[in-house]
Image (cartoon, helix red, strand yellow):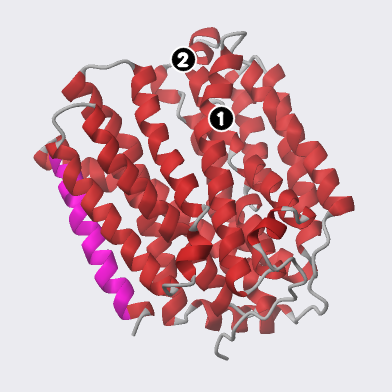
Amino acid sequence: MQPTANNAPDNTPQTPKGLLGDQNLLIIFAIALIAILGVSSVTPTFPRLAEALEVPPQNIGLLVTVFTFPTVVLGPVLGFLADQFGRRKILVPSLLLFGIAGTACAFARDFNLLLFLRFLQGVGAASLLSLSITLIGDLYSGDRRITALGYHGSVTSMGTASYPIIGGALASLGWYYPFALPILAIPVGLLVLFALHNPEPKARLNLHEYLRNALTVLKNRQILGLFLASTANFVLLYGAYITYLPQLIEESFQTSTFTIGLMLSSVSVAIALTSSQIGNLARRFSPQTLIRISFGFYGLALLLVPFMTNLLMLLIPTTLFGIGLGIGFPSIQTLLAELSPRQYLATVMSVNGTFFGIGQTLGPVLMGVAFAIGGINSVFFVGVGFAIAVSIVFRYCVCM
């Protein structure tokens, strides 16, 4: 069986302005904002938490690891269940679990209990981001799909930029206050239950038949190429950018952590602005072309980083990197939605989410090896070579 175009029902308004007024899309944005809440909102409180609960600094990262691990393991399973039984039946329990377990973290005063609750919260989070993208694939097609995905990228970028500020402000009141934010997932779950109108799957396939056909879809060369591109996005983002750019800023310019945070947020601003225009770009360029252009932006941005002689000049490569992400990420999602048969869309998007996790895990490791061998600048030069190599392989897998 070969993948066919996803011809999902599309009864949404014809203009981007009307699209932003669509109730379904606003609920999808709320799901996406909950999906990215679990890490960026609580990391500012980690130093206070470590002191209050007497946690060794080398162990504090476990609060992130136990939260993200369920996404890697459970993502494809939850995608399969969403394809079989419907998106709402997975989203509602996931949001409620996220909200209940996450809010319970604010009342935990034992680190081991906190880790267990974070793990449960991570189980709730495992399907949220991929299913929010799946819903866009279900509801929209053509230009409106990529425009909606662009808006989705803008909204998540604004959340990524603002959550550390919100979490830091709450942490000034007490280390546990940022952990109360997940209570917002509960009303979002009720919105999904009562107000989201999505064309749910009608027929259930035999499990053996479903898995056989889904495997055929996932082995498609173009889809594999898009999985590679997704992984590469997060290798570069979490490896070169999130892990080692702050260290370069600290070593080169001896600036404050607040200033470092502002520099990092410039990428989110660039992503948000670029993603909001992806619909216009998609009318001029194919998704394949936009993805290759995004890797060009990554390579140029990383190449420039070691040559910036003052802090303000670093805004040039960080902005270029953000533009690349704003172009590439929604284009990958759009092409996956176009290539995936609708009955396997949640599975494909969830497997793609697993590749996000692989990139997040491998990025710091790979760039750490580069740092150990050649120092801080080698991280960015290796990133340039990696971006070029992925672009070449992507062209072979998807564009030929």
Question: Helix, strand or loop at disc 1?
Answer: helix
Q: How many neighbours does mark 2 have within 10 angstroms: few (below 14), some (14-19), or many (20 or more)?
A: some
Q: Which residue is mark 1?
A: 163
**Circle 1: residue type:** Tyr
Residue at 79 percent across and 53 percent down: it is 23
**Circle 2: residue type:** Pro
Q: Position of residue 288 (x, y in %)?
A: 40, 73
Q: Is 355 in the magenta?
A: no
Residue 24 located left or right of residue 297 = right
Distance (Cα) linking label 2 and label 1: 17 Å
Q: Height in image: 342 above or below 161?
A: below
Instruction: Name the residue furthest left.
Output: 374
Q: Which residue is mark 2?
A: 47
Q: Position of residue 334 (x, y in %)?
A: 53, 68
Q: Is 386 in the magenta?
A: yes
Q: Is residue 364 visible?
A: no
Most foreground residue, 378 or 289 = 289
Main SS of residues in magenta: helix
Q: Which residues are magenta?
A: 377-396
Q: Position of residue 99 (x, y in %)?
A: 74, 35
